[in-house]
C-alpha cells in the first residue's frame, strides 16, 4: 500500500474509532436533548461558526429531511439581527467544539431572556456553553485525525454522527415514513423512486384484451399499445397478462404456427400476473419487477380493478432502479 493510502486509512480509522468512543459516551444528555425537541412545537434552530457552522448546516438539513423542522443560523449574523429568526416555541442547538467560542456564547443571554431551550453540542463539558445549556451532547475526542492534532477532523465527524443520531431518533419516534420522505424530496431520482406508481403508469389507451380473443388479435393490439404486453381483463378485473417475451417463447417452442394464431389468449397467457397498487411507491414497483424478472405490470386500484400499466424502462429512464440481465 502506498504512503498516501496508509495516511488515508489511518485518518479513516481514527475517525471511526472516535465515533465508537462517542457512542460509549452517550448519556442522559442525549435523552434530555431528544425530549426537549420532541416537546417543542416550533423549529429546531442550529447555530455555529467556522467548521462547527458547516456541521450545523448539514445537521439542520438532515433534520428537515427526516421531518423535524429545522433551520441554520450563522452565529455571527445572529448577533447582528438574525436572532429575530427564532420564535418563542423554537429550540436552539449551539455548536462549539471548545464550548467557549465568543460568537456562540454571545447568543446565550438573548436565548435565555426569551426562555428558548438550549442544547449544546460541544467537546468540552466544563465549558461555559455546556454549563449554560439545558442539555449537552458530548462530542469530545481524544485527538484529531491529522498528524499534529490540529485540524477539526475527528471532532467534526463525531458532531456529524451525533446530529444524525438525534435526527434519526426523532424521525423514528415520530413514525416518519418513506411517503413523508418523498414529500420532502420531490426532485431527482430519489424523489422519483419515492413517488407513487400513479405518477408513472400509463393510464390512457391501455392494451386491454378479452380472455376469449385470439392470439392474432392480441398481437395486433400489443403492437399498437407500445408497451410490449396486453392485459386480459374481464369486468374491470385483471385476469392475466401476455407479453412480447411470452410470444417469442411460444413461437420458439412450436412448429405449427397456423394453429397458434387462432388460439384463445386465455389458454396461453399468464393467468396469475404480478400487479401493483396505484398508491404504492415507485420503488416498490421497481423491486417487484426486478425480483420477478419482468418489465411490465398491471396497476390496480383498491378494488383490484385495472387502472393502468407500468413499465420498468420508463422508471429506469427517470433514474430509478437498475435493469438486470438486459430485461
Image (cartoon, rainbow, N blue to C red):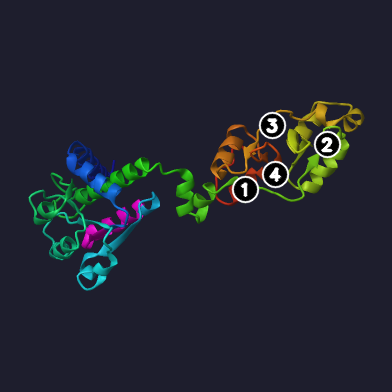
How many angstroms separate mark 1 from mark 3 (CA)? 19 Å
Q: Which residue is mark 1?
A: 198
Name the mark nearer the viewer: 3 or 2: 2
Q: Position of residue 300 (x, y in %)?
A: 67, 40
Q: Which residue is mark 2?
A: 210
Q: Residue at x 10, y 52 (%)?
A: 131
Magenta region, main secondary structure: helix
Q: Which residue is mark 3?
A: 273
- State which tag comes first along the sequence, 1 or 3: 1
How many angstroms separate mark 4 from mark 2 (CA)? 16 Å
Q: Which residue is mark 4?
A: 307
How many angstroms separate mark 2 from mark 1 (CA)? 24 Å
Where does the magenta region start and end? Answer: 46-63
The relative height of residue 20 versus residue 69 in the rendered view (above or below) is above
Q: Residues within 10 Å of mark 4 (few under 14, many from 20)?
A: many
Q: Is residue 73 magenta?
A: no
Name the mark nearer the viewer: 4 or 3: 4
Q: Residues within 10 Å of mark 3 (few under 14, many from 20)?
A: some
The secondary element bearing badge 1 is classed as: helix
Amino acid at each position: 500500500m502506498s504512503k498516501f493510502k496508509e495516511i488515508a486509512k489511518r485518518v479513516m480509522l481514527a475517525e471511526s474509532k472516535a465515533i465508537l468512543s462517542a457512542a460509549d459516551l452517550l448519556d442522559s444528555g442525549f435523552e434530555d436533548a431528544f425530549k426537549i425537541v420532541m416537546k417543542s412545537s416550533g423549529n429546531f434552530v442550529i447555530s455555529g461558526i467556522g467548521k462547527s457552522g458547516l456541521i450545523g448546516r448539514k445537521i439542520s438539513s438532515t433534520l428537515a429531511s427526516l421531518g423535524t423542522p429545522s433551520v441554520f443560523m450563522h452565529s455571527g449574523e445572529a448577533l447582528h439581527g438574525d436572532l429575530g429568526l427564532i420564535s418563542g416555541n423554537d429550540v436552539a442547538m449551539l455548536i462549539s467544539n471548545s464550548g467557549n467560542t465568543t460568537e456562540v456564547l454571545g447568543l446565550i443571554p438573548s436565548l435565555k431572556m426569551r426562555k428558548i431551550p438550549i442544547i449544546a453540542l460541544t467537546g468540552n463539558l466544563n465549558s461555559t456553553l455546556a454549563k449554560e445549556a439545558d442539555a449537552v451532547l458530548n462530542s469530545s475526542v481524544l485527538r484529531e485525525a491529522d498528524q499534529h492534532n490540529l485540524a477539526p477532523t475527528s471532532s467534526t465527524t463525531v458532531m456529524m454522527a451525533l446530529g444524525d443520531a438525534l435526527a434519526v431518533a426523532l424521525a423514528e419516534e415520530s413514525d416518519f415514513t418513506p411517503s413523508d420522505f418523498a414529500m420532502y424530496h420531490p426532485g431527482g431520482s430519489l424523489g422519483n423512486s419515492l413517488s407513487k406508481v400513479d405518477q408513472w403508469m400509463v393510464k390512457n389507451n391501455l392494451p386491454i384484451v378479452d380472455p376469449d380473443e385470439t392470439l392474432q388479435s392480441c398481437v395486433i393490439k400489443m403492437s399498437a399499445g407500445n408497451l410490449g404486453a396486453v392485459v386480459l381483463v374481464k369486468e374491470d378485473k385483471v385476469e392475466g397478462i401476455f407479453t412480447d417475451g411470452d410470444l417469442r417463447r411460444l413461437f420458439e417452442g412450436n412448429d405449427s404456427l397456423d394453429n397458434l394464431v387462432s388460439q384463445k389468449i386465455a389458454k396461453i397467457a399468464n393467468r396469475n400476473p404480478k400487479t401493483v397498487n396505484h398508491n404504492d411507491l415507485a420503488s416498490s414497483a421497481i423491486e417487484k419487477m426486478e425480483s420477478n424478472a419482468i418489465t411490465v405490470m398491471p396497476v390496480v386500484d383498491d378494488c383490484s380493478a385495472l387502472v393502468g400499466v407500468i413499465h420498468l424502462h420508463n422508471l429506469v429512464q427517470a433514474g430509478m432502479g437498475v435493469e438486470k440481465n438486459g430485461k
